[in-house]
Image (tube, rainbow, N blue to C red):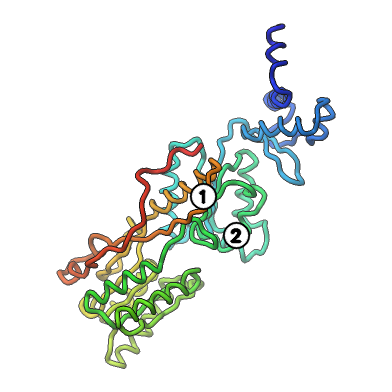
Amino acid sequence: MNSHRRSDSAKPRYQLIAESLEEDIATGKYVVGGRLPSERELAKRMQASYLTVRQGVGELVKKGLVRREHGSGIHVLAQTAAPIIAIVFGPSLVDESAHFYRAMLKALQSEMAATPFVCRMYDGFNLAEAEASMVATPHLHLVKDTRNHPIKGVIAISLRDLKWLDIAPLRGVPQARFNEHDADVYLDRSVFVRSAMEFAVQNGRRKVVYICLRNQPSFRSELGELEATARRLAVPMPEVVLLEEVSPPVDVLAHEKVAQLALRWKEAGSVPDAIIVADDIATRGVAIALIKAGIDVPADMLLVNLANEGIVHHYGVNTVRYNISATEIAWKLLIVLEKRFRGQPANETFSIVGDWASNPTNAKTDRAQNARPTDKPCQGPLPAQSPAALP
């Protein structure tokens, strides 16, 4: 007994306070979902200084037993709850066209399977913008989960409005972001534009149409690279078709645009040599329009598209794919998040470039098999292995 007292007396006061509060939580004095008294009230009850009590409560925060929330108090969390790494998607993953985002989620879940964290997905935040409020369904879902699970990190993917990263559960939590303003990891579409144009010209195609999405933050830089590359290769500036990607869906919109263009080409008696499409879903609509117009791909026209590695759409025509790896993006995001967990500098941004598929999609003809780039684009360094388990 005396030995126990001597052991306790050797401990810092804040640690004794933390242990006392932890015991009160374990015995049900403070229930899960409820709140502790304020730190000033605890200081008065325990006859300790406010700073000492705050340090003691901080120990419980580190263990994931409680969460401080400004203006709301100290909330008691489930003791057995695993901490969450929140994967916050702007787009909705239930959309038929969200193949790439679903592949990214699968890659992140796979990489994090050996960590002590729960990898939990929250999507549709871009759709919630229309509600102009913080009571949108994805937000409520996230807040509900934080009642029992502490959020230790956030990976944000294609959010149009960064206000969602400043909501109470996510504020101050280490974050890594892809493909939006001030992103840590971003898709370098300029490399795709340059590589696709060089490929088309290497294969004797000079009259090119370029189809891209207007709502991509990078679309102006894409067009700048398109013009610069055409000038350097001494070919005419490609005709640009901008898709709004609102309603109807992007593949339907691409089909309508190319069907209209095909009528114009037939009237003029001149068909472009190549179409470059900066979106795999849009490529589906383009391919159908070309089939209906009786344009033979690749005999009459070469079709080059930005695509997602491992996701093959059956377009009905031969396409040449420039693949983007969802796994590589997941690696880079976890590298950034791991550095921020450890308090290391993570100011470097990672640009993601693709690589040409070893075989064009649905390639069945000799001409399609020969229609491949002679040079691969420069590819950024890949990590030798996936990031170490997050702390």
Task: Examine the rendered structure and indicate whether residue 370 appears above or below residue 309.
Answer: below
**Quarter of the figure with the N terminus:** top right
Task: Examine the rendered structure and indicate whether residue 6 appears above or below residue 43.
Answer: above
Seen from the viewer's position, the closer of residues 248 and 173 is 173
Query: From this viewpoint, which residue is outermost toward the bottom?
Result: 268
Local SS, label 1? loop
**Residue 142, x across and y down, in percent:** 60, 48
**Residue 213, x across and y down, in percent:** 45, 72
Q: Identify the residue position indicated by label 1 in the image.
A: 346
**Which of labels 2 and 1 is toward the front?**
1
Seen from the viewer's position, the closer of residues 327 and 268 is 327
Seen from the viewer's position, the closer of residues 219 and 291 is 219
Give the numbered dot on residue 162. Answer: 2
Neighbor class of circle 2 (other Cα within 10 Å; few <14, some 14-19, many 20+) is some
Left or right: 85 as drawn, with respect to 291: right
Give the numbered dot on residue 267. Answer: none
Q: Amino acid at mark 2?
A: Leu
Seen from the viewer's position, the closer of residues 275 and 95 is 275
Local SS, label 2? helix
Where residue 56 sits, quadrant-wise, is: top right
Where residue 317 sits, quadrant-wise, is: bottom left
**Residue 122, x across and y down, in percent:** 54, 51
Which residue is depicted at the point 35% across and 80% down? 209
Where residue 29 sits, quadrant-wise, is: top right
Distance CA(mark 2)–CA(mark 1): 19 Å
**Residue 128, x across and y down, in percent:** 60, 61
Left or right: 146 as drawn, with respect to 74: left
Neighbor class of circle 1 (other Cα within 10 Å; few <14, some 14-19, many 20+) is some
Query: From this viewpoint, which residue is outermost toward the left?
Result: 366
